Image: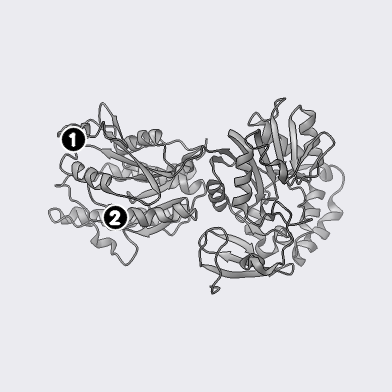
């Protein structure tokens, strides 16, 4: 750890020296996996020459995406229609800008190498142009800005309601970055920040964007272009291999297109509506919980969470013990949404329906059985509120808690042993299959930003939904943060609904199926 140094993105003190490259020092934040230049640690040092908008002065990046790639991404979102207004930020690709203008798009360049048909903007035009653009494009240059959140927030102001942001940048989780590590060619470039797909989405969220998607992107190049690219790597072995390969690149082999994984990722986001305060959506699936449901609602509605509004979405699944009458008492309560299901379809089905009605920035799932403590909400939500994480799990097994003591059914000791063994088995399979080191991915307390669900569809109806949700969020790229929570397991006599012989089979199916299935639509 580096004493007194904080991450400029999430404010974490878990900052350590990473390595030096190209006469620059790079530091790593263990909290959000950000790499950043050492000069940013002391912003008053005066070593960075910045433009009026906050970009590194006089520094432009080589074009990673071709003009055709950029146009394809805009076309996929209907942004090449005549009359569409696009602002390009810090763009040196004059050919791309000229092609945009030739398509009838009204293009404005902000600190860009503008073509004759492109109107140049400066900082004085920003207020006058607020809310007037359909799209904003930032290709390869966000890492050159001293404050990426402030940069994107300014672009948010320029966009119309529901406007589109198209962003590309080098990724720390790309195959070239993972393969070449310190020799990754992007480290030779004077970026201030290096992102991964998760922390850049945290930045977008903090700047006011949601519905974030990551379209697939692979580079199509010829062999000579690939060799020239690899020759830039500061590795003697790589350069030697390139020198050996060059004499063989003749004739058809020289012209053959190659599809290779690129160092860059592309993200597309939408301008979110403004909200005075963030909102939490609490999804409460209810089935035959007449004894505990009123107690839960009393505690939940009395729970105050600083700086957050709250909505409670109760999904009642055709209870037969009088629970529906208890739920009905809250139908007219402000801040409570009641959804009636004609018949029980399973907890997963109820939660999925609750997701469809949620309008909050954050979502938490809350069972009505009082096994979990509502006082843990504040701790679970803290990383989401500061923007350092998008997905949090409330673990029953960290903080010194013994997995074998968590499920103690005094009336059914063998069943308790069976479930504890099963948890260990499924946990091991989960961590091996998905390359994780989690202690409790099957916890009820799953807390995440609502925009994490963008592009995902769910199908599980029973308790296998717990597996499906975590797996799909992880495969989408989110790294869950585990925080210890309080937990008291209830027995089957008290109303536990897991079926001993049926549900484990659905869990096993989910573990295997979602390892192989496509995640995003």
Q: Give the image quarter of residue 119.
A: top right
Number of the label disc, if any, that sits on residue 375: 2
Q: Nearer the viewer, residue 125 or 383?
A: 125
Q: Secondary structure at mark 1?
A: helix
Rendered view: 223 above or below 286: below
Q: Mark 2 and mark 1 in contact? Answer it, CB < 8 Å.
A: no
Q: Give the image quarter of residue 96.
A: top right
Q: Nearer the viewer, residue 444 or 240?
A: 444
Residue appearing at x 25%, y 53% in the figure: 419
Q: Secondary structure at mark 2?
A: helix
Residue appearing at x 24%, y 43% in the figure: 297
Query: Picture coordinates of residue 263 (x, y %)?
Result: 67, 51
Separation of residues labelled 2 and 1 (CA atoms)? 23 Å
Residue beneath disc 1: 326
N-term-proximal mark, 2 vs 1: 1
Query: Picture coordinates of residue 219 (x, y %)?
Result: 71, 44
Number of the label disc, if any, that sits on residue 500: none
Residue appearing at x 81%, y 56% in the figure: 245
């Amino acid at each position: 750890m580096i004493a007194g140094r904080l991450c400029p993105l999430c404010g974490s003190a878990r900052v350590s020296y990473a390595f030096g490259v190209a006469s620059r020092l790079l530091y790593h934040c263990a909290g959000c996996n950000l790499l950043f230049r050492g000069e940013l640690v002391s912003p008053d040092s005066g070593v960075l020459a910045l433009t009026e908008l906050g970009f590194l002065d006089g520094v432009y990046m080589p074009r990673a995406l071709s003009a055709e790639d950029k146009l394809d991404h805009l076309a996929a979102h209907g942004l090449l229609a005549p009359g569409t207004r696009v602002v390009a930020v810090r763009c040196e690709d004059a050919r791309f800008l000229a092609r945009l203008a030739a398509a009838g798009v009204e293009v404005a360049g902000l600190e860009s190498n503008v073509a004759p048909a492109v109107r140049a903007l400066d900082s004085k035009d920003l207020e006058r142009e607020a809310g007037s653009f359909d799209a904003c494009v930032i290709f390869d240059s966000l890492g050159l800005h001293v404050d990426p959140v402030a940069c994107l927030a300014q672009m948010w102001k320029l966009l119309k309601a529901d406007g589109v942001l198209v962003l590309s940048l080098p990724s720390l989780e790309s195959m070239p970055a993972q393969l070449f590590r310190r020799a990754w060619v992007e480290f030779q470039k004077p970026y201030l920040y290096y992102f991964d797909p998760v922390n850049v989405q945290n930045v977008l969220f903090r700047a006011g964007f949601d519905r974030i998607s990551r379209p697939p992107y692979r580079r199509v190049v010829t062999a000579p272009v690939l060799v020239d690219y690899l020759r830039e790597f500061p590795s003697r072995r790589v350069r030697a291999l390139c020198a050996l390969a060059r004499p063989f690149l003749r004739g058809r082999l020289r012209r053959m297109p190659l599809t290779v994984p690129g160092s860059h990722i592309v993200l597309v986001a939408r301008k979110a509506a403004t909200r005075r305060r963030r909102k939490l959506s609490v999804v409460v699936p209810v089935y035959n919980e007449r004894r505990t449901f009123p107690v839960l609602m009393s505690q939940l509605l009395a729970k105050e969470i600083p700086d957050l509004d709250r909505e409670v979405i109760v999904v009642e699944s055709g209870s037969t013990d009088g629970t529906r009458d208890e739920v009905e008492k809250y139908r007219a309560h402000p801040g409570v949404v009641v959804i009636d299901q004609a018949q029980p379809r399973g907890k997963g089905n109820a939660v999925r329906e609750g997701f469809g009605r949620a309008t909050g920035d954050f979502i938490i799932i809350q069972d009505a059985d009082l096994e979990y403590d509502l006082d843990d909400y504040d701790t679970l939500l803290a990383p989401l509120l500061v923007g350092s994480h998008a997905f949090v799990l409330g673990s029953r097994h960290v903080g010194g808690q013994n997995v074998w003591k968590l499920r103690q059914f005094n009336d059914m000791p063998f069943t308790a042993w069976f479930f504890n063994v099963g948890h260990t088995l499924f946990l091991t399979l989960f961590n091996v299959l998905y390359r994780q080191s989690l202690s409790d991915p099957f916890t009820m307390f799953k807390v995440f930003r609502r925009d994490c669900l963008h592009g995902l569809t769910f199908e599980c109806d029973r308790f296998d939904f717990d597996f499906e949700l975590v797996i799909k969020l992880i495969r989408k790229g989110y790294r869950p943060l585990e925080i210890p929570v309080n937990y008291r397991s209830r027995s089957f006599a008290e109303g536990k609904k897991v079926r001993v012989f049926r549900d484990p089979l659905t869990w096993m199916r989910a573990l295997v199926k979602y390892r192989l299935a496509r995640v995003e639509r």
